[in-house]
Image (spheres, rainbow, N blue to C red):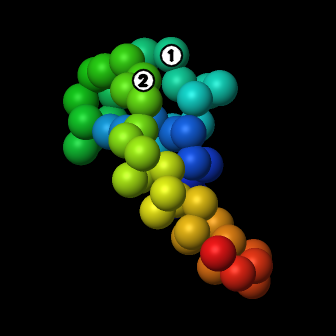
Amino acid sequence: MTTTPNSCRRCGIDHREHAQRWTAAAKRHQRTPPTQQQIKARRRARRARTGRRP
């Protein structure tokens, strides 16, 4: 799954599409903002995929 930096902390669904969701791993939940560490890791992963340096 490719997640955007601001996707849900628990399931990785983009914040614009989230609302209330059910996933096997996170069960039913509302969007939970990601931690700063998750945002940083997601940005680095996105840069690595696109070939941009951090």
Instruction: Label 1: state its secondary structure.
Output: loop
Mark number for residue 31?
A: 2
Which amino acid does the dot numbered 2 rest on?
A: Arg
The answer to whether any part of residue 33 appears in the image is yes
Residue 3 image position (x, y, % from top left) = 56, 52
Q: Quadrant of the C terminus?
A: bottom right
Q: Tell me whether the residue at label 1 lies in contact with that at label 2, contact meaning CB atoms closer than 8 angstroms.
A: yes
Residue at (41, 52) in percent of width and height:
38
Residue at (56, 39) in percent of width and height:
6
Residue 8 image position (x, y, % from top left) = 44, 35
Residue at (37, 41) in percent of width and height:
35
Mark 1 vs mark 2: in front: 2
The quadrant where residue 21 appears: top left
Label whose residue precedes the other's in the sequence (1 or 2) = 1
List the residue tagged with mark 1.
19
28 vs 43, left or right, is left
Residue 10 image position (x, y, % from top left) = 32, 39
Q: Nearer the viewer, residue 54 or 31?
A: 54
Which amino acid does the dot numbered 1 rest on?
A: Ala
26 vs 46, left or right, is left
Residue 45 image position (x, y, % from top left) = 56, 70
Q: Residues within 10 Å of mark 1 (few under 14, many from 20)?
A: few
The answer to whether any part of residue 11 appears in the image is no
Q: Is residue 14 positioned above or below 32 on the image?
A: below
